[in-house]
Image: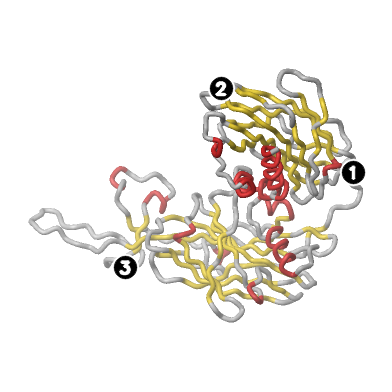
């Protein structure tokens, strides 16, 4: 019974953390939770679990879909799988155990049989081979065949599929024998049984957003430079707006080198917080909380405008590079609407490093020292940037290992007379799921967080 309690506790974590599992499939807290339940230390499992052929989409009311779970013993001696389980983690769709049927065939070609249901409030959880112990020799594999059917009344939405196993290593002391093996969670979309005939929600009205006065150059270790985020509501209705800014460089801008601050409603300067951009590893977003009592949204009445003062600097160890900055305005939806994100034009700028103090090498020489060329002055301390980043081309052999003073600041784009930035892209409107796929996290996550704060729960 101990291993069943162990597996049930782990599955409870799987079901409760369905959304977290989908967003970060390699992060899973089940073993830690079970360790607390059992009061024992959980060891890394010698058994690996891989789901093969799990469906990306399954239709509600359709036929069964078949896939496999492959368990492999990576140890050099036999280990025992005491119990296994298949889990459907709900990610907000509202699925229940009754919406699914799971059948399985044990390793060795046994006939299909129904898995044992272990009740779950959301999602679904089945125990497999609960009365049999699977002995895995060193390097051996065992394959379960699985067959999942989704009922016609199951709600459309996204779920995560996973396979767990409770493992014991008989060669270890009793308090160290148990381990928890799990597959990575696979995202599966439940398609509706009937194609909806109702029109899709219209995008929510959106606020325009502009970057105003972004400097073209920042010096690493230099003073903070101010600029503004300006939001304008020409939609004809009152809006709730969530702002963020996104650094969109060719490589990721390290968060610890960025000093981004914004002015709150009371005039105090507050640091921007890092946002999530898992789908774009080279992007760094900064979330703002400019609303009253620290909310990450603010009210923007129809016909109104709102300005947020910001300032930006970089630490002395920031590398010289070209960067781009975009401001985003997420408009929260009303009834019958989908959330909308609108971006500003992109402002390009350069991070440069200060040149070392000019010195002469004592002693006779026949060649006069060559003074560096600078855009600001010919004195020591002028900003420098590696030639490869200033020109977007590979450095010449003579330049390798030596910083070269920037020959000129980026050419101004005539479209940025009001922004102060470099070249730009046109504003873009992004709706609902696309905005989430971009990893900005400024719509659904913040919206849910706000609803929890307000106690609406809708």
Q: Secondary structure at mark 3?
A: loop
- The one nearer the camera, 126 or 234, is 126
Q: Are marks 2 and 3 in contact (CB under 8 Å)?
A: no
Is any part of residue 84 visible from this angle? yes
- The one nearer the camera, 242 or 15, is 15
Q: Are marks 1 and 2 in contact (CB under 8 Å)?
A: no
Q: Can you give x and y, in whole percent of width and height, for residue 38 in the image?
A: 63, 46
Q: Are marks 3 and 1 in contact (CB under 8 Å)?
A: no
Q: To which residue does mark 1 refer?
A: 153
Q: Please say if 102 is above or below 388.
A: above
- The one nearer the camera, 368 or 193, is 193
Q: Secondary structure at mark 1?
A: loop
Q: As drawn, is 71 to the left or to the right of 405?
A: right
Q: Please say if 204 is above or below 47.
A: below
- The one nearer the camera, 294 or 222, is 294
Of the two numbered discs 1 and 2 on the same chain, state the one appearing first in sequence.
2
Neighbor class of circle 2 (other Cα within 10 Å; few <14, some 14-19, many 20+) is: some
Location of the N terminus by quadrant is top right
Q: CA distance from mark 1 to mark 2?
A: 43 Å
Q: To which residue does mark 3 refer?
A: 377
């Amino acid at each position: 019974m101990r291993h069943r309690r162990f597996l049930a506790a782990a599955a409870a974590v799987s079901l409760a953390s369905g959304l977290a599992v989908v967003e970060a499939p390699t992060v899973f807290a089940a073993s830690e939770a079970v360790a607390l339940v059992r009061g024992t230390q959980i060891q890394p499992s010698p058994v690996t679990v891989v789901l093969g052929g799990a469906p990306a989409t399954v239709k509600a009311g359709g036929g069964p879909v078949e896939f496999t779970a492959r368990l492999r013993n990576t140890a050099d001696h036999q280990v025992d799988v005491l119990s296994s389980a298949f889990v459907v983690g709900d990610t907000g769709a509202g699925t229940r155990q009754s919406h699914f049927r799971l059948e399985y065939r044990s390793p060795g070609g046994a006939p299909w049989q129904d898995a044992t249901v272990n009740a779950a409030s959301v999602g679904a959880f089945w125990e497999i081979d609960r009365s049999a112990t699977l002995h895995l020799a060193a390097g051996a594999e065992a394959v379960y065949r699985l067959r999942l059917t989704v009922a016609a009344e199951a709600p459309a939405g996204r779920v995560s599929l996973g396979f767990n196993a409770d493992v014991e290593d008989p060669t270890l002391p009793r308090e160290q024998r148990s381990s928890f093996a799990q597959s990575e969670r696979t995202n599966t979309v439940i398609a509706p049984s009937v194609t909806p005939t109702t029109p899709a929600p219209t995008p929510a009205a959106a606020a325009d957003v502009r970057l105003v006065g972004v400097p073209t150059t920042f010096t690493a270790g230099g003073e903070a430079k101010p600029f503004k985020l300006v939001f304008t509501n020409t939609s004809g209705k009152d809006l709730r707006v969530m702002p963020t800014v996104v650094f969109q460089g060719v490589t990721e801008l390290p968060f610890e080198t960025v000093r981004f601050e914004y002015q709150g409603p009371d005039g105090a300067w507050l640091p921007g917080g890092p946002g999530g951009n898992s789908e774009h590893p080279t992007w760094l977003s900064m979330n703002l909380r400019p609303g009253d009592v620290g909310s990450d949204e603010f009210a923007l009445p129809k016909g109104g405008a709102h300005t947020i003062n910001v300032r930006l600097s970089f630490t002395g160890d920031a590398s010289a590079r070209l960067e781009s900055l975009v401001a985003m305005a997420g408009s929260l939806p009303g009834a019958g609407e989908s959330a909308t994100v609108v971006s500003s034009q992109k402002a390009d700028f350069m991070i440069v490093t200060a040149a070392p103090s000019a010195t002469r090498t004592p002693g006779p020489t026949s060649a006069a020292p060559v003074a560096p060329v600078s855009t600001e002055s010919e004195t020591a301390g002028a900003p420098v940037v590696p030639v490869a980043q200033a020109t977007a081309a590979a450095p010449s052999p003579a330049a390798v290992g030596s910083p070269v003073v920037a020959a000129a600041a980026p050419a101004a784009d005539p479209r940025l007379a009001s922004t102060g930035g470099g070249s730009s892209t046109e504003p873009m409107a992004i709706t609902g799921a696309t905005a989430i796929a971009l990893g900005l996290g400024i719509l659904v996550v913040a919206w849910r967080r706000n609803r929890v704060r307000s106690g609406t729960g809708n």
